[in-house]
Image (spheres, rainbow, N blue to C red):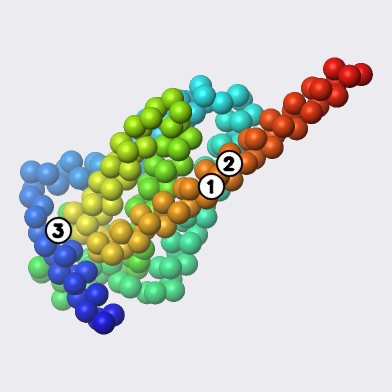
Amino acid sequence: MFEQILQLDTDVFIYLNSMGTPKWDSFWMAYTSKFNWIPFYALLLYLIFKQLHLKGFLITIVAVALMILVTDQVTNLFKNGFHRLRPCHLAELIDSMRLVKSGCGGKYGFFSGHASNTMAAAIFIGLTLKKRFKYLIYILIFWAILMGYSRIYIGVHYPLDVLLGMLFGMLTGILFYKLNLYMINKFQTKRKNQDLGNDLK
């Protein structure tokens, strides 16, 4: 059963990856690069800053940093635990696939760090800004799904790597959103109590 799942995963990878064309290669290479999205991340952080007071924003920054750290570390644990080679590291696949990226990246690919990080960010930021931007979370989820697809397109991840990465990212995004909300509410309650105490003096 497990072997059948892996074979299906390989077949779907070959199908999706082979749909690519040289005309679209530069687009998906640009899309999959984290550095190209820095202005986009900066805009989202600015929107969060406008919504929260300064200390709430700083708490949120810490929560985001911890979320990315946890996501990265768990991803590495899975990669080093399962030892599933990336498709571009398999000699039997290299002739039947398109490797768009120059170089294959790390040796193991289960599960995708790109997919987990972007989905975690999409869920966290989408939930944080949902009161002011009702539909933003759906746009961010779509953006994260395309990021996952880009990893298949350029030839460095199987669909299963991407799917489980996105599911894990969704989980961590929700958990850290709730943690961040708890910490902000706790800080606000503490500040109100301090202000009340000062007024009574």
Q: Earlier in the sequence, mark 3 or mark 1?
A: 3
| Three-letter amino acid code at the position of disc 3 | Asn
Q: Position of residue 125 (x, y in %)?
A: 44, 37
Q: Earlier in the sequence, mark 3 or mark 2?
A: 3
| Three-letter amino acid code at the position of disc 1 | Phe
Q: Nearer the viewer, residue 178 or 34?
A: 178
Task: Give the class, few, some or many, for how many residues have Cα within 10 Å of label 3's Cα (few <14, many ≥20).
Answer: many
Q: How many marks?
A: 3
Image point (18%, 64%), residue name: 13
- Give residue 105's quadrant in the image: bottom left
The residue carrying mark 3 is 17
| Three-letter amino acid code at the position of disc 2 | Asn
Image point (39%, 74%), residue name: 82
The label on residue 180 is: 2
Answer left or right for 159 relative to 129: left
Q: From mark 3 to mark 2, how far is it between C-alphas?
A: 38 Å
Q: Nearer the viewer, residue 178 or 116?
A: 178
The residue carrying mark 1 is 176
Image point (72%, 32%), residue name: 189
Q: Position of residue 185 (x, y in %)?
A: 65, 35
